[in-house]
Amino acid sequence: MDGTPEELTTLVGREVYSNNGVFVGEVDDIRLDLDRQSVTGLALGRLNDELFRNRIEPGKGVLIPYRWVRAVGDVILINDVIERLKQPDEEEESSLVA
């Protein structure tokens, strides 16, 4: 991507997945650093309930750093770091059961 406006606008509406294939959300907007003429983040909506339940109010979105993006094509792939959001709750629940 060379940063032309036409290419940037094509990112809006694309689905975002972790590189493990887990749906994360859909691109609603793009965050830019105008001084450096670069993309710094992606604003996501239509979020995966499993990943964001009890963390993000329904109807709200998240902003992910663009450095997490691994590939841009028909969909956008990001690092699996987003999946680690689930772990604290899972660990809490398993310690409560044990």
Image: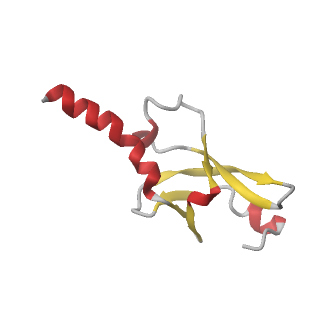
Choose between 47 and 81: the one closer to the eye: 81
Q: With respect to residue 58, does 20 lie above or below?
A: below
Q: Please give the count of numbered marks on the rendered protein.
A: 0
| Rendering coords of residue 36 (x, y %) | 83, 60
Q: Quadrant of residue 62?
A: top right
Q: Residue furthest front?
A: 36
Q: Residue furthest left?
A: 98
Q: Quadrant of the N terminus?
A: bottom right
Residue at the image point whose x is 81% and y is 67% from the top: 6
Q: Is residue 63 left or right of residue 58?
A: right
Residue at the image point whose x is 80% and y is 53% from the top: 33
| Rendering coords of residue 89 (x, y %) | 33, 34
Q: Residue furthest top?
A: 96
Choose between 6 and 42: the one closer to the eye: 42
Q: With respect to residue 61, does 33 lie above or below?
A: below
Q: Is residue 31 left or right of residue 52?
A: right
Residue at the image point whose x is 52% and y is 32% from the top: 56
| Rendering coords of residue 50 (x, y %) | 39, 41
Q: Is residue 44 left or right of residue 23?
A: right
Q: With respect to residue 94, does 48 lie above or below?
A: below
Report if residue 8 is visible in the image.
yes
Q: Quadrant of the C terminus?
A: top left
| Rendering coords of residue 51 (x, y %) | 42, 42
Colouring used for the render: secondary structure
Q: Is residue 23 left or right of residue 67?
A: left
Report if residue 14 is visible in the image.
no
Choose between 70 and 30: the one closer to the eye: 70
